[in-house]
């Protein structure tokens, strides 16, 4: 998709702190990290959100998850991490290209959601 920031990152047209790349996914460090480890894993092909996926996307969806453990371990979060996919308006998604957040570090990331 021509105007998508994450498509441009995956294609190397916008610089990023690359963490990993294979045939299906690209991973890079979040520009505003919320924890010491904060990596985004995206499909190389444009998919607007998790809500736009179909069964045909299962290979890339599986890959997004299967690289998470390795990326967390290699980037300062070997004892666990949290994987988050914000989806649509209700999910608080800001960038309309599917992305998996991997957040972690040396200390626990905290409660899953604010209770307030
Ligand atoms: P979300 O709210 O789930 O859509 O998260 C979007 C994330 O993308 C945020 O954590 C942003 O900090 C991050 N982000 C936006 N633009 C960039 C960029 N150019 N490079 C790295 N991370 C970005
Ligand atoms: Zn895109």
Image (tube, helix red, strand yellow):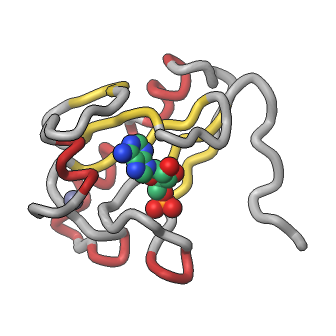
Along the viewing direction, whichever of 6 and 85 lies nearer the viewer: 6
Query: Residue 42 location in percent, x, y?
Result: 31, 48
**In the drawing, does residue 1 fall left or right of residue 72?**
left
Asked whether residue 98 appears in the rendered view, the answer is yes
Quarter of the image for residue 9 reads top left
Residue drawn at point x = 26 percent, y = 33 percent:
15
Asked if residue 70 is positioned above or below residue 46 in the image, the reply reads: above
Along the viewing direction, whichever of 70 and 11 lies nearer the viewer: 11
Along the viewing direction, whichever of 94 and 24 lies nearer the viewer: 94
Asked if residue 74 is positioned above or below residue 111 in the image, the reply reads: above
Residue drawn at point x = 75 percent, y = 58 percent:
112
Residue drawn at point x = 82 percent, y = 54 percent:
111
Asked if residue 58 is positioned above or below residue 75 in the image, the reply reads: below
**In the drawing, does residue 115 fall left or right of residue 67?**
right
Residue drawn at point x = 58 percent, y = 39 percent:
33
Asked whether residue 65 appears in the rendered view, the answer is no
Query: Residue 41 location in percent, x, y?
Result: 37, 43
Query: Residue 57 location in percent, x, y?
Result: 21, 62
**In the drawing, does residue 59 fall left or right of residue 77?**
left
**In the drawing, does residue 104 fall left or right of residue 69?**
right
Q: In which quarter of the image is ligand 2?
A: bottom left
Asked if residue 26 is positioned above or below residue 54 in the image, the reply reads: above
Along the viewing direction, whichever of 91 and 22 lies nearer the viewer: 91
Quarter of the image for residue 36 reads top right
User: In which quadrant of the rendered image does the N terminus lie?
Assistant: bottom left
């Amino acid at each position: 998709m021509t105007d998508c920031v994450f498509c441009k990152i995956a294609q190397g047209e916008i610089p990023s702190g690359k963490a990993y790349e294979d045939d299906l996914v690209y991973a890079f460090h979040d520009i505003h990290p919320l924890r010491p480890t904060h990596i985004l894993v995206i499909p190389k092909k444009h998919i607007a959100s998790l809500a736009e996926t179909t069964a045909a996307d299962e290979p890339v969806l599986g890959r997004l998850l299967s690289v998470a453990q390795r990326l967390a371990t290699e980037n300062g979060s070997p004892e666990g991490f949290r994987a988050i996919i914000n989806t649509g308006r209700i999910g608080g998604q800001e960038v309309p290209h599917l992305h998996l957040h991997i957040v972690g570090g040396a200390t626990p990331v905290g409660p899953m959601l604010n209770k307030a």
